[in-house]
Amino acid sequence: MANTEGSAPAHYDSFATSYDEIWRVPGIRPLLPLLTSTLESVGPHKDIAVLDLACGTGIGLRVMQALGARRFVGVDISTQMLEVAKSNTPPGDRADEQGRFDVVLGMWLLNYAPSAAELAGMWANVAAYLKPGGRFVGTMENHEAVTAPRLQSGKYGVTETELNPLPGGHGEDGFQVHLRFQTEPVVEFDAFRMKKDVFERGGGQGRHDQPAVQAARPRRGQADDC
Ligand SMILES: C[S@@+](CC[C@H](N)C(=O)[O-])C[C@H]1O[C@@H](n2cnc3c(N)ncnc32)[C@H](O)[C@@H]1O
């Protein structure tokens, strides 16, 4: 079922207990060490407050915990995802920083922006949650490399179908896509895949002081050619 067929929270609720299977498919598994080394770089972790936007089952918070973070908050639209996150994540202390955090995580958050304007709004929210000098770490595919045709073979454990084009001020900005992971049970949902330049332009309109989009390059052997 695509999440276009029902409410998004209910859709994510429906596979919350099996969602973590996606971290085992060949296209996603190599991202975990990359994520871990990226999160290592935002340390020292002991005293920092962390906010995870669209935390899902909490994997980002658990990586931060393993690195020493103790104060965190995770938010998500799916109550079942949050339940799984709570049951899988050892309790920490609620970060109570008047809504400002040292680190904001947004792993596969920005792909829910259906337009450059809404993406700019998401960046503005991220910036509003950060303390001065705080850092955002997110996960997002390189939209020039990850395309529906390249994912068709299934060798990455996920296929992508283009649904609706996203009209924009400069022609087609990208596509709404449907992702289907080869997990048991199948995990599938819709997202938005904007062209790289549109994505970066949208990010550039948010309220932030540093370049918003920086590519993390996998070390050789960590990722395939996708
Ligand atoms: C692909 S999962 C990523 C979860 C987690 N960050 C991870 O890396 O495993 C996307 C999460 O975003 C939530 N989500 C879906 N649509 C959203 C939206 N429009 N705004 C915010 N969160 C959304 C879902 O409930 C889901 O838990």
Image (spheres, grey):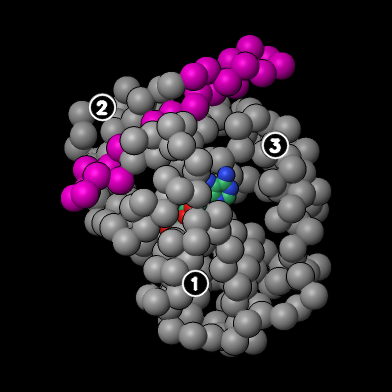
Q: Residue at x 36, y 51 (%)?
A: 14
Quarter holding the N terminus? Answer: top left
Q: Which residue lies furthest to the top in this view?
A: 171
Residue named by callout 1: 61
Give the secondary structure at mark 1.
helix
The label on residue 92 is none
220 relative position to 140: left or right = left
Give the CA separation, mark 3 to mark 2.
Answer: 28 Å
**First-in-chain label (3 vs 1):** 1
**First-in-chain label (1 vs 2):** 1
Residue 172 in the image: x percent, y percent?
A: 59, 15
Q: How crowded is mark 1: few (under 14 residues within 10 Å), some or many (20 or more)?
A: many
Do the CB atoms of the residues marked 3 and 1 lie less than 8 Å apart?
A: no
Give the secondary structure at mark 2.
loop
Residue 5 in the image: x percent, y percent?
A: 43, 32
Quarter holding the C terminus? Answer: top left
Q: Which residue is drawn at 42% across and 45% down?
A: 11
Residue named by callout 2: 152
Residue named by callout 3: 118
Residue 112 in the image: x percent, y percent?
A: 56, 40
Say which amino acid is labelled 2: Gln
Span shown in magenta: 164-187
Q: Residue at x 30, y 52 (%)?
A: 22
Foreground residue among 211 and 115: 115
Do the CB atoms of the residues marked 3 and 2 lie less than 8 Å apart?
A: no
Say which amino acid is labelled 3: Glu
Give the CA separation, mark 3 to mark 1.
Answer: 25 Å
Give the secondary structure at mark 3.
helix
218 relative position to 212: left or right = left
Quick check: can you spot residue 103? yes
Residue 30 location, quadrant: bottom left
**First-in-chain label (3 vs 2):** 3
